[in-house]
Amino acid sequence: MIKIRNCKRKDIDSIISIYKSNGWWKDCDNKKQLIKLIENSHCFIVAQDKGKIIAMGRAISDKSSDAYIQDLAVIKEYRNKGIGLKIVKKIIEILKKDKINWIGLIAQNNTEKFYEKLGFKIMENSKPMIYGKF
């Protein structure tokens, strides 16, 4: 049975593995930096199956009005089983409980339909931007 829960320090190596498998881990990244990332997130949720971390997602926020969902990832063999939906629903539940009413995200290419199932819409007249080289 899949368990959705808050991330714990003991999950660090599994989280690093998921970041690496998605190409999100750079050579300059390290455990100390990841611990800080987790601790400074509004919430960091993982999915676990038989003790193995199989998915993650987090939200960052000003803890007052706005939040962004980031880093949603499910390992390949568990995709298309509703696990990502459960994680996003849990994150939204936490944010709403904390009275965060504006929840945004930047969807990767071809993931819009996934987020639309959860009530997200494309923001008209908006374009994601990033500072510097990426």
Image (cartoon, grey):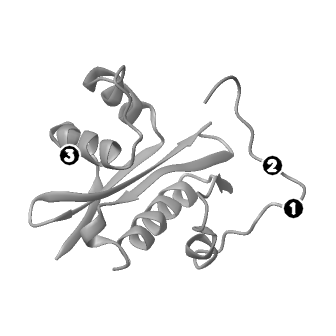
Horizontal arrangement in the rendering, residue 42 relative to residue 62 (left or right): left
**Could you give the CA–CA distance between mark 1 and mark 2, rounded to whole angstroms?**
9 Å
Q: Circle 3 is placed at which residue position?
A: 14
Tell me the amino acid under the disc marked 1. Glu
Name which residue type carries label 3: Ser
Mark 2 is surrounded, within 10 Å at the Cα level, by few (under 14), some (14 to 19) or many (20 or more) other residues, namely few
Q: Quadrant of residue 49?
A: bottom left
**SS category of the residue bearing label 2:** loop
Quarter of the image where the N terminus is located: bottom left
Residue 124's label in the rendered image is 1
**Callout 3: SS:** helix
Which residue is identified by label 2?
Answer: 127
* Residue 116, position as x, y percentages in the image: 64, 75
Identity of the residue drawn at 61% across and 58% down: 107
Q: Is residue 96 left or right of residue 124?
A: left
**Disc 1 + disc 2, Cβ < 8 Å:** no
Quadrant of res 110? bottom right
Q: Is residue 128 left or right of residue 94?
A: right
Residue 108 in the image: x percent, y percent? 58, 57
First in sequence: mark 2 or mark 3? 3
Q: Is 70 rendered above or below residue 54? A: above
Amino acid of disc 2: Lys
Compare residues 64 and 78 and report the one nearer the observer: 78
Q: Nearer the viewer, residue 51 or 23?
A: 23
User: Foreground residue, 82 or 7?
Assistant: 82
Query: Of callouts 3 and 1, which one flags the residue occurring earlier in the amino acid sequence?
Result: 3
User: What residue is drawn where x is 9% and y is 66%?
Assistant: 50
